[in-house]
Image: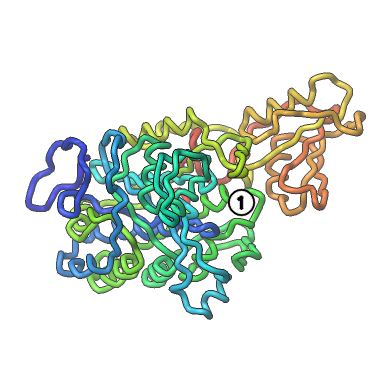
Amino acid sequence: MPTPPRSSRPRTAPQPSRRPSARDARPPAPAPAPARRRPRWVMRTVTTLSVVVLASAGIGHAVLSSLDEDIERVDPFRDMKNRPEAGHGMNILLVGTDGREKIGREEREKYRLGGAPCHCTDTIMIVHISEDRDRASVVSLPRDSYAVTPPHTDRVSGERHGEHPLKLNAAYAEGGPQLTVRTVEKMTRVKIDHYLEVDFASFMKTVDVVGGVEICTDQRLKDSHTGLDLPAGRHTLKGGQALQYVRARHVDGASDLSRMKRQQHFMAALVDRATSSGILLNPMRFRDVTRAVLGSVRADEGFGTDELLDLGRAMRNFSPASSEFTTVPVAPVGHTVKGVGSTLKWDTEKSQRIFEALRRDQPLTGHRTRDEAQRVPVDPRQIRVQVENGTRTPGLGRRVDAALSAIGFGTTRAPVNAADRDVKRTVVAYDPRWDRSAKSLAAALPGSELRAVKGQGATLKVIAGADFEKVRKVRALDPGQGEFGVVRGDEVGCS
């Protein structure tokens, strides 16, 4: 797998695939990844990604040499066979874990971190650094993704398991970093070159050391589970509040998918902060930030000081515009598995095109075209819809369901007849907790009536009336474009 050149040697052509070792593997990795159930350790992703960016200062080996000792080592590649073929560039698996026991009692109470820590992952990301070190592509893998593990030994019980279905984040609990890497490689056919695992404490320290991270929101963000309460506007978040921001998953009906988008935005903002604040030019601040990150990180043996410096030298011109973020496309309808529960099944065709782009070292954005779709607050792909035919016109329900599905809404594909068959005006019925999703759906149905129904739940209802003519194309306010919803780092900052 090609890696950044040592400073004493010119760049060489890509070498045949082989398992990296501490001295042999070159590239270091970017931002820390999300983890644990509630938090979406994108932040961690953010954290590690910032390390890569910080290293671009090229401050000397002396500043970083002692940091190697702070990194706890794991061997996620031990005895792995039949791995995917190495592509071009470097792939880092960023995993977020809990680690709340490292945070003081007062802060745990303030930021709603009660309960026993869970030694599992919540968010998993693949960070791809292009071979020319000019681009970083970050792909979020939803924690509830449907997965099938390879055969393995349970790390707690020692019991030997054959392959079996589970949610992706459960792979860590059964087999630790090794099973997590094996499962991700099996699902994506993308070879993982480095493994990084970050916890809450590291994330909070890193955000504080860089002086906070600025984020913007066009609406109030309130989540009773994490305690997040941000009014609309511009905010500079310090460690604890930043943790609340990336963990929040009850802000609206979009839940986990919405949280992943916020985490991606935060990562881009952290990179912007690191590259624009002078940290890279200040050896002492640079050292403090890297210590904050690496002090709570677990990584493979191949990720060390030399690799960090090599990658840093190759990335001196890295900026938010050089980064792109997306989430693996999932099927609109959940996939229930006996003994596992409700899971998210990836859209096979679209997800494979994303992973093929990583293997080929190609950008995810591709060619962007302009469209006239109306912008709405919630991505249609995150909105579940049940369609009812409120008229006596045969097939109207199927027509409305198909039209909404065609522009991205997650319809049930099973329209039914409404109790009232004399509806004149199309109705969007919704639980008040999902009011933003309802507004997004109503925008696709010009002239429709919004009707709040307390206790209806997360699934919105469309009762097609006699006035229905057509569905209007809508697109989320988020700048994500293209079929994969990719955004660049410079598109999600405060303007």
Looking at the picture, tell me which residue is in the foreground, 258 or 171: 171
Quarter occupied by residue 446: top right
Q: Secondary structure at mark 1?
A: helix
In x, y percent, where is residue 104?
A: 48, 78
Colour style of the rendered protein structure? rainbow
In x, y percent, where is residue 484?
A: 48, 36
Q: Residue at x 15, y 64 (%)?
A: 61
Q: Is residue 367 above or below residue 40?
A: above
Q: Is residue 439 left or right of residue 201?
A: right
* Residue at the disc numbered 1: 255
In x, y percent, where is residue 42?
A: 45, 55
Kindly tell me whether residue 490 is visible in this rendering: no
Q: Residue furthest bottom?
A: 106
Looking at the picture, tell me which residue is in the foreground, 198 or 257: 198
In x, y percent, where is residue 53?
A: 30, 57
- Assign the N terminus to one quadrant of the image: top left
Q: Is residue 486 left or right of residue 478?
A: left
Q: Residue at x 44, y 43 (%)?
A: 161
Q: Residue at x 21, y 37 (%)?
A: 17
Q: Is residue 74 left or right of residue 233?
A: left
Q: Is residue 303 left or right of residue 432?
A: left
Residue type, numbered disc 1: Ser
Mark 1: few, some, or many residues within 10 Å (few <14, many ≥20)? some
